[in-house]
Image (cartoon, coloured by chain):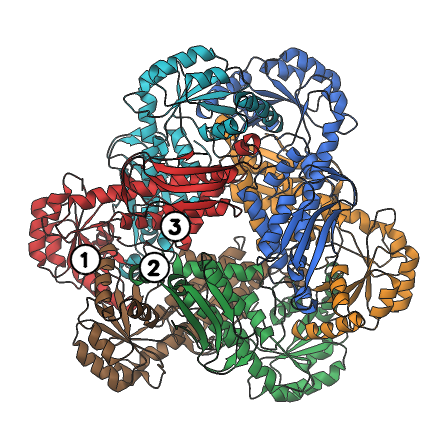
Chain colours: A brown, B green, C red, D cyan, E orange, F blue
Amino acid sequence: MDLLGEEAREAVRRALREDLSQGDVTSSGFIPEGSVCRAEISAKEEGVVCGLPVAQAVFGEVSCGDLRLELSCEEGDAIEAGTTVLSLSGPAAEVLAGERTALNFLQHLSGVASLTRAFVEAIDGTGVRLLDTRKTLPGLRSLEKYAVRCGGGSNHRFSLGDHVLLKDNHLALLKTAFPGSWAKEVGLRAERVRRLRPLARIEVEAQSLGEVAELRTLPLDLLLLDNMSLEELRRAVALIGGRMRLEASGGVTLERIRAIAETGVDFISVGALTHSAKAMDFSLRITA
Amino acid sequence: MDLLGEEAREAVRRALREDLSQGDVTSSGFIPEGSVCRAEISAKEEGVVCGLPVAQAVFGEVSCGDLRLELSCEEGDAIEAGTTVLSLSGPAAEVLAGERTALNFLQHLSGVASLTRAFVEAIDGTGVRLLDTRKTLPGLRSLEKYAVRCGGGSNHRFSLGDHVLLKDNHLALLKTAFPGSWAKEVGLRAERVRRLRPLARIEVEAQSLGEVAELRTLPLDLLLLDNMSLEELRRAVALIGGRMRLEASGGVTLERIRAIAETGVDFISVGALTHSAKAMDFSLRITA
Amino acid sequence: MDLLGEEAREAVRRALREDLSQGDVTSSGFIPEGSVCRAEISAKEEGVVCGLPVAQAVFGEVSCGDLRLELSCEEGDAIEAGTTVLSLSGPAAEVLAGERTALNFLQHLSGVASLTRAFVEAIDGTGVRLLDTRKTLPGLRSLEKYAVRCGGGSNHRFSLGDHVLLKDNHLALLKTAFPGSWAKEVGLRAERVRRLRPLARIEVEAQSLGEVAELRTLPLDLLLLDNMSLEELRRAVALIGGRMRLEASGGVTLERIRAIAETGVDFISVGALTHSAKAMDFSLRITA
Amino acid sequence: MDLLGEEAREAVRRALREDLSQGDVTSSGFIPEGSVCRAEISAKEEGVVCGLPVAQAVFGEVSCGDLRLELSCEEGDAIEAGTTVLSLSGPAAEVLAGERTALNFLQHLSGVASLTRAFVEAIDGTGVRLLDTRKTLPGLRSLEKYAVRCGGGSNHRFSLGDHVLLKDNHLALLKTAFPGSWAKEVGLRAERVRRLRPLARIEVEAQSLGEVAELRTLPLDLLLLDNMSLEELRRAVALIGGRMRLEASGGVTLERIRAIAETGVDFISVGALTHSAKAMDFSLRITA
Amino acid sequence: MDLLGEEAREAVRRALREDLSQGDVTSSGFIPEGSVCRAEISAKEEGVVCGLPVAQAVFGEVSCGDLRLELSCEEGDAIEAGTTVLSLSGPAAEVLAGERTALNFLQHLSGVASLTRAFVEAIDGTGVRLLDTRKTLPGLRSLEKYAVRCGGGSNHRFSLGDHVLLKDNHLALLKTAFPGSWAKEVGLRAERVRRLRPLARIEVEAQSLGEVAELRTLPLDLLLLDNMSLEELRRAVALIGGRMRLEASGGVTLERIRAIAETGVDFISVGALTHSAKAMDFSLRITA
Amino acid sequence: MDLLGEEAREAVRRALREDLSQGDVTSSGFIPEGSVCRAEISAKEEGVVCGLPVAQAVFGEVSCGDLRLELSCEEGDAIEAGTTVLSLSGPAAEVLAGERTALNFLQHLSGVASLTRAFVEAIDGTGVRLLDTRKTLPGLRSLEKYAVRCGGGSNHRFSLGDHVLLKDNHLALLKTAFPGSWAKEVGLRAERVRRLRPLARIEVEAQSLGEVAELRTLPLDLLLLDNMSLEELRRAVALIGGRMRLEASGGVTLERIRAIAETGVDFISVGALTHSAKAMDFSLRITA
């Protein structure tokens, strides 16, 4: 789907360094020199496969050139338990050197993609888009956000540097500094930031309908409705009347997400996609 | 508990680079210059806290020196929802620059420690030790293994270079190369490896009682019993009779782990501790 | 103005490594041991100062702790020739170790900021915003884009990963693949990208008024008008009628920019801001 | 001309990381999967081409192996506007991923080489050599000094560690410490440094003819004549009488350099070669 | 023998960066463009060859793909003076760019392997194993420990993180904190560490027979007998009676090691293997 | 003596990473929490101390700020066995975390400095300078060359990029390409290189008096006389007659060096200084 970025390549090298800094004491001591083999990586449960180019990059790094790889499905495919996703043939020591690292990427990224798919299907047909957050595992942000896209979700910002999101803590500071005029200050500063970074989106978090009312006339791209009830969400949608796009967040579960989507918001963001996805089980088996 | 290793420091710098490569467009555009504040990081659910020194290191990296941190609990403490774990006071822009990165470490490591603690408590009193695996999230292995220790679990090997573990794939290669004498070959090679790496432990995976019988007279430290029924585990324990330590793995759940522990094995390993731990929820709130 | 991001810190370490990998053979051989001094960094020509926090970071890296720094102006200030911007006092060997590296950052970033300011002043009052490009010096993108903001300019995208910009080469490929329906394909794909990356802006380059006409009904954020005459620009503004924002680029000089701005476009982008800025001259002088 | 050093390879990886950390959202969203193309990089103005091996390295890094490159001119060639320098054929996504980064290197290094060539031609036939300085852009020193050589110029020292250059600030410290005997101290220390680093050149800056007179009997390799008038330069040449080589610096322009060269100095150094070179314009065009 | 780990690959890149950061001024200035050659690396003295895969990796890094390498002996072979170990054919500039770096690895690692072999042969037939230490050259630990294995020696721990070794300084701290019960404290803490890190070995250093007596009933894997006389070693062996394995260290020379081995200890450790090995002389000669 | 360069700082971080990637399992398990101590690093044999600033940097990296260090001798001092060189006081866990790494630098660099001093003293009074080579341990070149200076020796070139040295292999290639005119070609190319890199020294290796005769009129800085007898060296000195400086190398021992020096050469280079220096023994002892 995407060309693998530089950040992904570094994650691959880093992971191999964790596992192989001092070589592979098992293979070097027990595998007959010159062994070659065929092997397959297969899913042990159903889900959405993600991370195949990363697994390929892992084996590319450990191989001296004689390892052949063949994909048998595509990124983002929904697969059954038992499906083979990647076949290998070549030096056994290289297959075994890359095995765990490749599986660790595959099981996590497919876990993220599969959880994303489940949430996306729960709001199917509503037109609402599922968003990820910056609540990612340290060092894996780009890859996790890629997995979210593979699962059919959408990416919120990638870092503190690409878009503006004023949250409760920022507003608390502004309310202290400008007690009676914080909302006006937000507007003034939003205009200044827009001049400097015209492509950046500007979003503000509202914690109550009162805040929604104060913010609705400002030049914002998005309003984040944090932890609101369904009724509050509906009233916020009405108050804003299309002036800016609305994102609901907080306490979003697979059970509750459809009801939230039906309140009329544009986006629903779920931190669990990246910070709490269960691994999807894969294994590598030598077949000959 | 442990002094923070170099690998952890690099994980911190890497995570900050993900979030702050291009600065913080929200703080630089909206926070009044020179703002100072007090803030608290608190748990939003109960669990075992882990990662406080990492969170301190995050703020240490983003701060120019005027940020004060105070811990109010210790690594490995079981805490209630609402407990404050770390208080901060200093430049608001620094608090906000480190917030998400610190929380991302804290929520993941505490998630791992909490899940570990739950498994440890389920086998309390049996004398069996809970082990982690190499099924860790890429780039986070040292930290996740530290979290397992904080949760009361034990660490299996850290990399392919520190101990030997012959798994089904290695045995398949040896069986192909030495059809009638694979177990004898394992023994010969184990002796050679022991000469070169006398501190390294040597463990072999058995997939059936037949393999247990073949392996029981070899000079091994551990035998891994993969995916066996409780009855098979009991019979393996009897077959081995204390000659080597036994590790059970495969399909271990919170419901089933106590019954496994009662079969008489020494260790039970659980990949989910590190690859499928749900984040423990923490938040940072500016209080003044 | 902005908090210094991680990318800037790495640029500082890298630059010091270029100059100091093998120590400073002049200071170690000729400066009396223990020498301390006062010194000043001053501008030798007028311009907009930019890079002071970077210069501070340079001296922070080379110092063992006894070097004191004091700023005497602020980032983005327009200063006269002769103005002192930073005073130092401490070990002479540290002042001299950081001198050239600090000046190299300062002279380049101030050069970018000064050139930006000149273009910004040329379109003062028109409401048009000046944009930078990705035509930056390798390894210095974040810092150069920061210097553009210091000079009063605005930032276009930071990388191939944050926003979409379809240029002539992309369109050539689409026209080859979908001869009769390329514009429709652009629209279909723009919708798909928007679902995956809803915060990303989507911009397309038009090389002629014909292309402007084809593109005007698509769901785009910006249209890039490349190398058009003033008359073409005016007609493009009329054709689009506010449906999307317009960026003019190509052949923009200080002489010509005001006329371009007066055609009614929203943005004018100038690669020269970052790839061809003349250094602003600064020097460091030991005063006591 | 030169084999590409390790520092250049790192500059390439760094530049790609700036542009591609999060992949290429335009290509991945808009380019038909599997597209292949032919493309050409051509100069849009006349000048001295420099950086072709760097551009090759950029495409080598982004390519998975199916991208073919063909050079059609050599490093250091003086070319006309319109000249194609590099042809590519292969996956369109790879061509587009490397395009901007390759051009950014090419336009800057060719800019440096072209400016150098202009200065070199201005002193053609005088036997005087044009030198660069350490006033380079942070992170690009080796490459810029390579470009200077491509343009026909000569390299002064690469870092604070390879040769000695005592400048006004060093002399100020020595004059303070040894008021009556600073020149003698320079001589004593020069001898000591020569013993430790016998290959290193030793150069001292003189700011006046008086200083020239004081320094002329010391065991130096070079004397730097800073900001002197033509008359002063001529008198310095006479005073030194071939005892050491002479370098003129300060305020050197294309207009003035020939007159300086004709004073009889050996070298003229120009910081602008590396800190103020205008980019030479190149573009990449997909041709099929 | 071993697959080359990631740490070794980084050592190779780092060494090349030391030598080639600014290219190769000799080859680029003096070698006729396009020169190809054949060359051989040969030993100039007898010894145990080690580091051939590292030398291959060096040439792999400097080559653009046209350099052919052929090994003519195997890692760990005892070779005569004059033996050719590696033949090369391809671009002369690549051969010369890698020459010194490849030889630097080869001469050091072969030096370590050869010294190890000498010590191993001195204790041949005693059943005692020769151990290395953490007294390694900074940045070369993994490679030096690999060379020890090539020479027939055994590896002690790789870092402070993989096994426990309580030395005199640790015991001094425990004796201060628990004056009358330090040995009991060691035992209690050993049990706790074993629960957390069940694969880690636990070793304690004894400086006298009195300490041996105090430690002999604790649950330790190894006892380090530091700087004891042969008589003390014999008595320590008797006191321990097989309860744990014994390592002798301190003042071990080629003359004295056999007598130490005959006292009945299990291991003898020698820091000199890695910190004081003389280089084994190799040279590269262009043959055609 | 020298300010510690960036390369040294990286060597320190790298060495700590080798030892502390996974923390210190001994200290964290056995040292009472909060222990503080005093400790001393002392020499266990006589020699020239070198590496104290590196040892300080090691403890600076592992310390959180409460470790105090005090030097009691200076770099390059000749010290007796038993001399304390560095005293520490602070957290015991930090002292122990840095101990081995600091000692590893100190023992190696002091070993190099001590061996250098021995050679320097052997030629005392002859006026000949002792040179090191590029036969350094991978990753330690800058530090080893610094140790050579501390021992009173002189540095030859640092890399393939700073000076020219044409050795037998380069000459073989030139002789093949220009059979009758190789020496003339050397001269032509030397002039071209001098134009591009006027500060670089140019040295050529002569393997026989015949080659000395062919090379003596070329514009070279140095001539390397490789593996010549004392008689040949004397005749080479006479042949050259001061036209260029002469370096003798090959088979230089402590016994033979004075005789070589007395032949009248200017420099003698010894690879063993860096590739075969025995460690000088130091230890760290906790004193309270």
Label 2 belongs to which residue? A161
Q: Position of residue B285 (x, y in %)?
A: 39, 73
Q: Amino acid at mark 1?
A: Leu
Q: Is residue B222 above or below residue E28?
A: below
Which chain is indicated by disc 3?
A: D
What element does badge 1 sit on? strand
Which of the two residues, E40 or A196, is positioned nearer the viewer here? A196
**Do marks 1 and 3 share a chain?**
no
Q: Tell which tag, 2 or 3, sits nearer the viewer.
A: 2
Which chain is indicated by disc 2?
A: A
Q: Is residue D255 left or right of residue A7?
A: left
Label 1 belongs to which residue? C222
Badge 2: few (under 14), some or many (20 or more) residues near its Cα, within 10 Å? many
Q: Amino acid at mark 3?
A: Leu
What element does badge 3 sit on? helix
Label 3 belongs to which residue? D16
Badge 3: few (under 14), some or many (20 or more) residues near its Cα, within 10 Å? many
Q: Which mark is residue B278?
A: none
Which of the two residues, F73 or A239, is positioned nearer the viewer here? F73
